[in-house]
Amino acid sequence: MPRSVATVCDTVAARWRATGRAEVRLADTTVQVTSDTSAQSGCIVLATAPQGIDSTRWISLYWAANEPPGWTDLPQYDADGPDGGGRTMEHDGVRCQVDLTQDGGDDSDSTYVPSPAIGETTFCWLRSGGTR
């Protein structure tokens, strides 16, 4: 695993763990990603907070900013919906696909109370030609 890729996953996982509210798994894996035609080898962080997290903890997460410093959003791979969304970010040849899940509610039921649970999956890999 290239150090530049592993460092991002380690940091993402550490910030989720620091919330004190999340279950976090970190692993090396191979994934078919939106932005590339072939499967990519990299690392993945699976974070879930069944009871949600407050805004103070939220802003401490790695991907909480719309565009974290040094990272460029690749908007052609973005997706958004009431139950979450996804985006692909790039920095120095490292790409990360970040998918967020949440309970978006039920527009047809005014009494529906959404679950506070949230989840984030981050998969990072070294784009061809990126730095190790």
Image (cartoon, grey):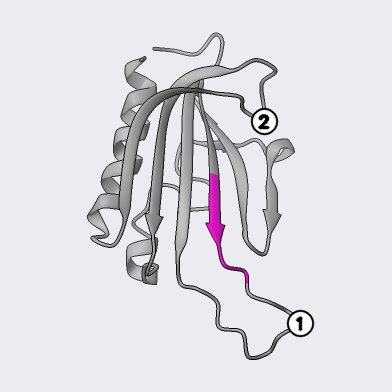
| Residue 83 falls left or right of residue 62 | right
SS at badge 1: loop
- Position of residue 37 relative to residue 63, above or below, is above
- Residue designated by label 1: 108
User: What type is the residue that disc 1 sits on?
Assistant: Ser
Does residue 112 sit above or below 10 in this rendering? Answer: below
Other-residue count near label 1 (Cα within 10 Å), few / some / many at <14 / 14–19 / ≥20: few
Please state which amino acid type lies under the numbered disc 2: Thr
> Which residue bears the numbered disc 2?
34
Which secondary structure is most common in the magenta stretch?
strand
Task: Tell me the quarter of the image containing the C terminus.
Answer: top left
**At x 36% / y 15%, what residue is drawn?**
2
Q: Is residue 8 visible?
A: yes
**Residue drawn where x is 47% and y is 49% of the image:** 120
Screen quadrant of the N terminus:
top left
**Residue under the point 55% across and 46% down:** 99
Give yes or no for residue 3 being in the magenta stretch: no
The stretch of residues the image draws in magenta is 99-104
Q: Earlier in the sequence, mark 1 or mark 2?
A: 2
Q: Is residue 74 above or below residue 49?
A: above
User: Residue 25, percent across and down?
Assistant: 33, 40
